[in-house]
Image: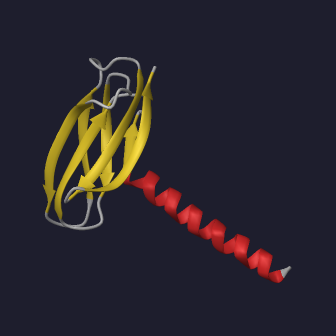
Amino acid sequence: MTKKILFFFMLFLFLTQYNYGQENKIKISPNNLSGTSSILLTLEERGEYNLTIINKTGEKIFIKKFEIFEKKSYAFKHDFKNFDKGDYTFELSSKRKIIANKKFSKN
């Protein structure tokens, strides 16, 4: 019984850490993509990064390239008025490796 409890506790910690790590890297406020929204990216190290927005058909409709010189959060505003209603995937990458991706919807 103790082994099962320990196993589930370890599994819970692993999954919680993985999910929160993914979610906290990309934040949008307000998160419904209406009008102009602020995009906040939490970056763990210096380097060159890309933020790509992909629509529901898989088309890359926005790519922002930027470089970070110190560990910090990176924020900017983007106007989503011209985006169609639907789901969008925000993909954060560095050196062709995906760091995080998160889906947002425009209603």
Does residue 44 appear in the picture of this structure?
yes
The residue located at (46%, 19%) in the rendering is 107
Residue 64 or residue 70, whichever sits in front: 64
Does residue 31 appear in the picture of this structure?
no
Q: Is residue 105 left or right of residue 53?
A: right
Q: Is residue 99 left or right of residue 19?
A: left
Residue farthest toward the right in the current orientation of the protein: 1
The residue located at (25%, 47%) in the rendering is 75
Residue 1 against residue 57 in the figure, above or below: below
The residue located at (26%, 62%) in the rendering is 72
Residue 102 against residue 84 in the figure, above or below: below
Quarter occupied by residue 56:
top left
Residue 22 at x, y percent in the picture: 44, 55
Residue farthest toward the bottom in the current orientation of the protein: 2
Quarter occupied by residue 29:
top left
Which color scheme is applied?
secondary structure
Residue 91 against residue 30 in the figure, above or below: below
Residue 16 or residue 30, whichever sits in front: 16
Residue 28 at x, y percent in the picture: 38, 39
Residue 7 at x, y percent in the picture: 71, 75
Residue 40 at x, y percent in the picture: 32, 47
Q: Where does the N terminus fall, quadrant-wise?
A: bottom right
Residue 60 or residue 84, whichever sits in front: 60
> Could you tell me how many numbered marks the image carries?
0
